[in-house]
Amino acid sequence: MDNIDISNVPGNANLNQPIPLGEDLDKPIPFDDGTSKASVSHSPLSLGGSNTPQAPRTAAPKIAVPKPAVKKVEEKRVSTNRITCVKTFFTKLHPGALEFLDEQITKWLKENPGITIKRTNTVTGNIQAKKTDPNIIISIWY
């Protein structure tokens, strides 16, 4: 809602009525029939196109643009230290489940002897299944 300043409205004024302009309200609004004092040009605006006569322009000096350097085509080098994949293991937090997790990770590493582990992350958090239980989550980045 707009804030209306009513500090200068007299106490007996009706706030629902518009403020009179001090002019004759029965007088029609004048149209632009050429009798108004404001002079507005109705001719098209010239933007300097080819249809308008102009003074001859002086030629702008040409600037020599340097040619881009040609780069040698190089073979893409693939780093062997990059992390390319991740494997995530998780289990509930009780002794039997932790032993099972160890066996899972060991089995996965034996099945994939060419894997080089780059980083591991371990975090605990809730995993929602039938019940929400605290779990240990191990991410192995290789």
Image (tube, rainbow, N blue to C red):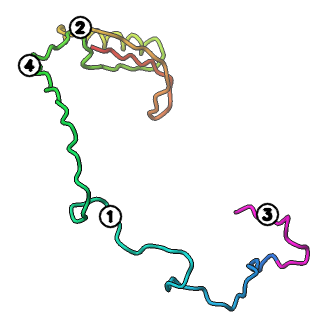
Q: Report the magenta residues as a range.
A: 1-14
Cα–Cα gap, marks 2 and 1: 72 Å
Indicate which disc residue 116 carries. 2
Q: Residues within 10 Å of mark 1 (few under 14, many from 20)?
A: few
Task: Name the image quarter holding residue 92.
Answer: top left
Residue 113 image offset from top left, x and y in percent: 18, 8
What amino acid does circle 4 point to? Answer: Val
Residues marked 3 and 1 touching at CB (< 8 Å): no
Indicate which disc residue 5 carries. 3
Residue 17 image offset from top left, x and y in percent: 77, 80
For the N terminus, which image quadrant?
bottom right
Residue at image mark 4: 73
Camera-nearest residue between 8 and 67 = 67
Indicate which disc residue 71 carries. none
Taking the image as shown, residue 115 lies to the left or right of residue 23, namely: left
Cα–Cα gap, marks 4 and 3: 73 Å
Camera-nearest residue between 5 and 20 = 20
What amino acid does circle 1 point to? Answer: Ser
Residue 11 part of the magenta segment: yes
Taking the image as shown, residue 6 lies to the left or right of residue 43, namely: right
Cα–Cα gap, marks 1 and 4: 52 Å
Does residue 111 appear in the picture of this structure?
Answer: no
Q: Is 38 drawn above or below residue 118 in the view shown?
A: below
Q: Residue at x 76, y 77 (%)?
A: 19
Does residue 35 appear in the picture of this structure?
Answer: yes
Q: Residue at x 32, y 64 (%)?
A: 46
